[in-house]
Amino acid sequence: MIIGVLALQGDFREHIQVIQACGHEALEVRRVSELDQCQALILPGGESTTIALLARNYGLIEPLRKRIGEGLPTYGSCAGMILLANRIVDGIDMTVRRNAFGRQVDSFESELDFAGHQLRAVFIRAPWVEDLGSEVEVISTVKTPAGEIHPVAVRHKHLLATSFHPELTHDLAVHRYFFDEVCK
């Protein structure tokens, strides 16, 4: 399977390494012609405003909306979750709060249950899900220091989003879930 990674800004290189470790072909996506080759897509972490601005400048917003709307399996991590939630690419029916856990110095790691798999999640200026549509499935949650529980991994049909960065760990569970469950 050819998995594209939107390679305009952010940690796209780390996702490419994970894709290859999972046995798939990875493709850096900066042009519509590259997007057209993809059988699935990853929107990486980084600065969501910068990624969206660059996608507009590269003429990718409308093609992204079209492909995602047509059912292209898409996974967004951290900033990618924000892009899917902000309706920039007409994604998941959810509202997220940017930098919900605090500033860069408030970044942390946490043990999570992700679809029955225990993993260590890396949260860097991460969003959390504030509100969900009725058809959105919560895959994983985290408890804040204030005791609130928020979704940090969700799925809706062919779309997957996480607040955290699984590409920064050696655990391939989130990506394998995307390839094996969402992309089928």
Image: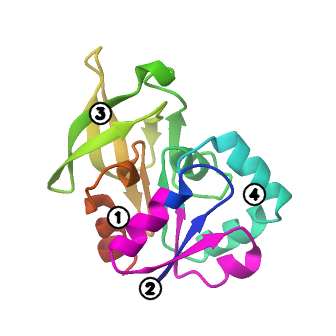
- Residue 126, image x, y percentages: 46, 34
Which residue does the image show at 25% across and 18% down from the upper left? 147
Mark-to-mark CA distance, 1 and 2: 13 Å
Inspect the image, locate mark 3, and give the three-letter code of the amino acid beneath it.
Glu
Inspect the image, locate mark 4, and give the three-letter code of the amino acid beneath it.
Ala
Which residue does the image show at 65% across and 70% down from the upper left? 29
- Residue 124, image x, y percentages: 45, 33
Secondary structure at badge 3 equals: strand
Secondary structure at badge 1 equals: helix
Q: Which residues are magenta?
A: 14-42
Q: Is 132 on the left or on the right of 10, as rendered? A: left
Secondary structure at badge 2 equals: loop
Return the residue at label 1. Answer: 175
- Residue 6, image x, y percentages: 62, 63
Return the residue at label 4. Answer: 55
Return the residue at label 2. Answer: 1
Which residue does the image show at 76% across and 65% down from the upper left? 60
Residues marked 3 and 2 touching at CB (< 8 Å): no
Characterize the local packing of mark 4: few (<14), some (14-19) or many (20 or more) Cα atoms within 10 angstroms.
Answer: many
Quarter of the rendering occupied by the C terminus? bottom left
Secondary structure at badge 4 equals: helix
Mark-to-mark CA distance, 4 and 3: 30 Å
Mark-to-mark CA distance, 1 and 3: 18 Å
Residues marked 1 and 2 touching at CB (< 8 Å): no
Identify the coloring.
rainbow
Characterize the local packing of mark 2: few (<14), some (14-19) or many (20 or more) Cα atoms within 10 angstroms.
Answer: few
Residue 143, placed above or below residue 6: above
In the foreground, 142 or 164: 164
Please identify the residue farthest to the top as the structure is shown: 146
- Which quadrant of the view contains residue 24? bottom left
